[in-house]
Amino acid sequence: MSRIHLLSPRLANQIAAGEVVERPASVIKELLENSLDAGATRIDIDVEQGGVKLLRVRDDGGGIVEDDLPLALSRHATSKIRDLDDLERVATLGFRGEALASVSSVSRLTLTSRAASADQAWQVETEGRDMAPRVQPAAHPQGTTVEVRDLFFNTPARRKFLRTEKTEFAHLEEVVKRLALSRFDVAFSLRHNGKTIFSLRPANTEQEARRRVATVCGPAFVEQSLQVDSERSGLRLWGWVGLPTFSRSQADLQYFFVNGRMIKDKLVAHAVRQAYRDVLFNGRHPTFVLFMELDPAVVDVNVHPTKHEVRFRDGRMVHDFLFSTLYRALADQRPGDAGAASD
Ligand code: ADP
Ligand code: MG
């Protein structure tokens, strides 16, 4: 038997990366969430070869000061929470301080940033190995660019699990779409192999929001959906629900956001399914882009770092509210029923 020894930080990060960083799409999720947490109003994403060769995210957020740059790449280092109280009412998308450490341990990562308060930009580079990266001056406007090259170059076992460029890009694009739907006020652009996939301007009016949903979900969805907006005892639900005639054979056009965070939750899925039950054929899936807003104190979003689950304090009330709002919205689709929802 070998004796017990501590893992090197690099190996510990690579093990952690195994949980958070599965493929280019998971990297882009972390980078975009960081940009949003930094208050970015515009985020430009550049991808090569499905994200395996290159992922670059550039934002105009608050940036990182010179002294913090190496820390940003360290495990359990975060600017977002300090104590248990903060954890309980965390409002940022990230807070674990693991993403950049994990990603940098399995790629060639360059972090360039200029803080709002700084008179110049600084850069750190890592190559999967040095845990004490050196900081150099760089040119960059206020904000941050993270460049991730050659994902899994030093972990061939993980690299083997990557699929084709097309599949990896499809996953990545889906992540960008979700985040673009979660923040209408932020501009997003996505390029793949030098080609613009989409470029979304900030959407501050209802009409612009509609246009963004049409770009992200396809124009047919907005044309063939009903708009809902309902409020009850501190809960608000708004967005678009597809007509039963616009159902799909797969559950692939279903976006549900709780306080701006995309979730996939059993309770939510159940309430939606119930509302559609008598207007959809068996085996068909409803389409929706829905936003629920409620007091952050009555929903726990810290259940799991990558699973999109949440825990509602009063699940039953949330379920009833969702069901009855959607049931009522779909009333006209239900011949012979004037829409009297049974609350
Ligand atoms: P977390 O987001 O959980 O704090 P990360 O590893 O994703 O952990 O990031 C570590 C820290 O680096 C963040 O807390 C933040 O201070 C800083 N950071 C990362 N990305 C950005 C960015 N795009 N703009 C500003 N700061 C950033
Ligand atoms: Mg983060």
Image (cartoon, rainbow, N blue to C red):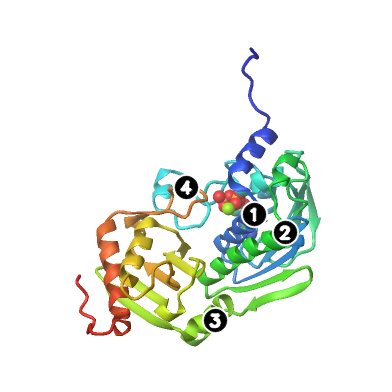
Three-letter amino acid code at the position of disc 3: Ala
- Circle 2: is it few (<14), some (14-19), or many (20+) Cα within 10 Å? many
Contact? badges 3 and 1 (CB < 8 Å)? no
Three-letter amino acid code at the position of disc 2: Gly
Nearer-the-camera pick, 317 or 259: 317
Quick one: SS at disc 1? helix
Quick one: SS at disc 2? helix
Distance from disc 1 to disc 2, alpha carbons, whole Å, reads: 9 Å
On the image, the x and y values in percent for residue 156 come to 75, 41
Which badge, 2 or 4, is on the more N-terminal residue?
2
**Residue on which the image places disc 2:** 51
Nearer-the-camera pick, 143 or 238: 238
Distance from disc 3 to disc 1, alpha carbons, whole Å, reads: 26 Å
Residue 34 appears in which quarter of the rendering? bottom right
**Residue on which the image places disc 1:** 27
Which badge, 1 or 2, is on the more N-terminal residue?
1
**Residue on which the image places disc 4:** 304
* Circle nearer the viewer, 3 or 1: 3
Which badge, 3 or 1, is on the more N-terminal residue?
1
Residue 318 lies, with reference to residue 152, above or below; the image says: below
**Residue on which the image places disc 3:** 214
On the image, the x and y values in percent for residue 18 come to 62, 42
Q: Mark 2: is the Cβ under 8 angstroms from ligand 1?
A: no
Q: Quadrant of the image for the N terminus?
A: top right
Which badge, 4 or 1, is on the more N-terminal residue?
1
Q: Is residue 204 visible?
A: no
Distance from disc 4 to disc 3, alpha carbons, whole Å, reads: 31 Å
